[in-house]
Image (cartoon, rainbow, N blue to C red):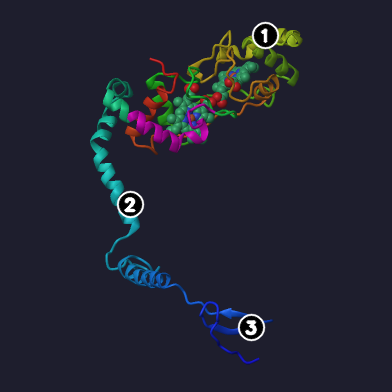
């Protein structure tokens, strides 16, 4: 079919010559402002390609020589330089001294919060509230290893039961069933007794708890204390509170006694600046449970 370009009577615009069942296609020109904007962006891109790194050739930097990564490196270096005097003071001071100096303390709390979010929150929760599965709350006054500045600093710097740091805190609870020290029935009894220590005695389990009492005295008191008060020297948690690392119900406690999974925490001395470890110590101490 021959195409015929004609002027549309209504709009005064030419048609393209295409026609379907009497419908004709108009060849409406693009608005001028739109075209000029497009030409301007093309021109802009040409200038940009010359000035800034655009083509992924090796060493292609554009005539300005500007590189995003270097700009960041420079910004970080400038920020470090600005903070250097403060970081030096934080490195030289003890956590106690930092906490006593309002200016240092304010800086340590701000820096400690960021370092905590980056390095610790994954295990201990965003606010240090801890997580079931063996990750203790750092925001309460129930401490496994101690809540003084020195104890917190030691824990953070060297970690717990890791293989990387010779000064890591370490201790092991026997695997009472797995190691054949107690039978599963005895573990149930002693678990009922432990629950009663925490003040959650279930009257239905009174006989079990009674049988568990001497088992506790013989097997557990050496680490967890006669009344379940715990022992920080060996990192044995208090059992006579209602704070549990691995779940609060009797079965979870019995499972733990039968085959304990010991918590591991990395050492930070090799990973973080000593100033950062000091800031973290002050920050954790201030989360709620700090001791003198
Ligand atoms: C990979 C997980 C993990 C990370 C990351 C981690 N921790 Fe821990 N942390 C633990 C575990 C598990 C324990 C408890 C160990 C135990 O049962 O004795 C613990 C214990 C602690 C304790 C001792 C608590 C007490 O009651 O005595 C402190 C303090 C602590 N962590 C601080 C930190 C800080 C600060 C960071 C970040 C620099 C951090 N942790 C990062 C797993 C972690
Ligand atoms: C050699 C020392 C030692 C002995 C003996 C020991 N424990 Fe432990 N126990 C620990 C340590 C250390 C932990 C902490 C494990 C961790 O933090 O990952 C622990 C943790 C626990 C927990 C978990 C506490 C919580 O908050 O969830 C329970 C329950 C427990 N022990 C019960 C017992 C009972 C019952 C016995 C005796 C049958 C016993 N333990 C004997 C060292 C000991």
Q: Which residue is mark 2?
A: 72
**Residue at figure coordinates x 31%, y 51% from the top left:** 73
Q: Which residue is mark 3?
A: 19
Disc 1 from disc 3: Cα separation: 98 Å
- With 149 as the anchor, is 14 left or right in this view? right
**Viewer-nearest of labels 2 and 1?**
2
Residue numbers of the magenta segment: 108-130
Q: Compare marks 3 and 2 and give the one earlier in the sequence.
A: 3
- With 185 as the anchor, is 167 left or right in this view? left
Q: Position of residue 204 (x, y in %)?
A: 76, 10
Ligand 1 under 8 Å from disc 2 Cβ? no
Q: Secondary structure at mark 1?
A: helix
Q: Position of residue 284 (x, y in %)?
A: 42, 25
| Mark number displayed over residue 213 | 1
Dot 2 alpha-carbon crowd within 10 angstroms: few under 14, some 14 to 19, many 20 or more? few
Q: Compare marks 2 and 1 and give the one earlier in the sequence.
A: 2
Which of these two is toward me, 191 or 186?
Answer: 191
- With 221 as the anchor, is 91 left or right in this view? left
Disc 3 from disc 2: Cα separation: 59 Å
Considering the whole magenta stretch, tell me its main secondary structure. helix
Q: Secondary structure at mark 3?
A: strand
* Residue 161 in sight in this render: no
Q: Quadrant of the C terminus?
A: top left
């Amino acid at each position: 079919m021959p195409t015929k370009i004609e002027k549309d009577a209504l709009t005064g615009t030419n048609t393209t010559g295409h026609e379907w069942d009497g419908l004709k296609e108009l060849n409406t020109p693009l608005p001028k402002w739109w075209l000029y904007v497009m030409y301007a962006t093309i021109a802009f891109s040409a200038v940009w390609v010359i000035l800034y790194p655009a083509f992924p050739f090796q060493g292609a930097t554009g005539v300005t020589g500007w590189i995003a990564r270097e700009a960041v490196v420079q910004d970080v270096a400038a920020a470090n330089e600005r903070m250097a005097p403060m970081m030096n003071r934080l490195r030289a001071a003890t956590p106690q001294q930092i906490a006593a100096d309002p200016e240092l303390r304010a800086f340590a709390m701000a820096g400690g919060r960021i370092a905590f979010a980056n390095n610790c929150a994954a295990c201990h929760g965003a606010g240090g509230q801890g997580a079931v599965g063996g990750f203790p709350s750092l925001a309460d006054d129930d401490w496994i290893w101690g809540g003084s500045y020195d104890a917190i600093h030691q824990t953070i710097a060297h970690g717990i039961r890791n293989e990387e740091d010779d000064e890591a805190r370490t201790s092991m609870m026997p695997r009472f069933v797995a190691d054949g020290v107690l039978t599963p029935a005895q573990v149930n009894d002693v678990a009922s007794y432990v629950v009663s220590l925490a003040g959650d005695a279930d009257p239905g389990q009174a006989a079990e708890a009674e049988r568990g009492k001497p088992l506790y005295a013989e097997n557990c008191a050496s680490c967890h204390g006669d009344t379940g008060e715990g022992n920080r020297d060996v990192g044995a948690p208090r059992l006579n509170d209602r704070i549990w690392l691995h779940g609060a119900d009797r079965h979870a406690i019995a499972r733990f006694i039968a085959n304990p999974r010991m918590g591991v925490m990395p050492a930070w001395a090799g990973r973080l600046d000593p100033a950062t470890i000091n800031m973290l110590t002050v920050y954790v101490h201030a989360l709620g449970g700090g001791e003198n």
